[in-house]
Image (cartoon, rainbow, N blue to C red):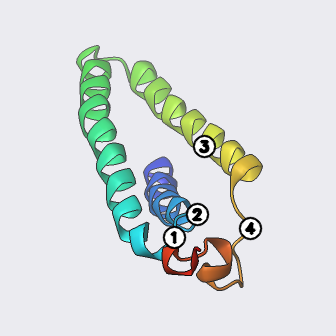
Amino acid sequence: MIIIFFASAAASAAYLTVSETFPLEIRALAIAFFYAVGTGIGGVVGPALFGALIETGSRAHVFAGYLFGALLMIIAGAIALRFAVAAERKPLETVARPLAMAK
């Protein structure tokens, strides 16, 4: 339950963080694209993987699956620490200039 709580918050933050690096005119498209890709991958791989783990009948295997998910979140956090744009307390137009301002 705790892992899923953090995964949900991490997924929401990831879509918004990624979208901040795109110009205003295509920001909604970027959010939609990353949401669709993330949901598509998670919606196919997640149920298949956890279904296979549950089918084993072993609590240890299911727990290992949750630990694997937690590891993926930690890796994603490390990537965000390294590559994320510092956008806090800045207007989004200064983070990614609108296309209308390009010359």
In the foreground, 74 or 4: 74
Q: Residue 73: x and y, percent?
A: 57, 43
Q: Pointer 3: what residue?
A: 76
- Residue 17, quarter of picture: bottom right
Q: Residue at x 68, y 79 (%)?
A: 94
Helix or strand or loop: what does disc 4 sit on? loop
The residue carrying pointer 4 sits among few (fewer than 14), some (14 to 19) or many (20 or more) residues within 10 Å by Cα, namely few
Q: Earlier in the sequence, mark 4 or mark 3?
A: 3
Q: Which mark is residue 86?
A: 4
Helix or strand or loop: what does disc 1 sit on? loop
**Closer mark to the observer between disc 4 and disc 3:** 4
Q: Which mark is residue 53?
A: none
Q: Earlier in the sequence, mark 1 or mark 4?
A: 1
Q: Pointer 1: what residue?
A: 23
Helix or strand or loop: what does disc 2 sit on? loop
Q: CA distance from mark 1 to mark 4?
A: 15 Å
In the rendered image, the quadrant that contains the C terminus is bottom right
Say which amino acid is labelled 2.
Thr
Q: Residue 47: x and y, percent?
A: 25, 33
Say which amino acid is labelled 1.
Pro
In the foreground, 55 or 28: 28
Q: Earlier in the sequence, mark 4 or mark 2?
A: 2
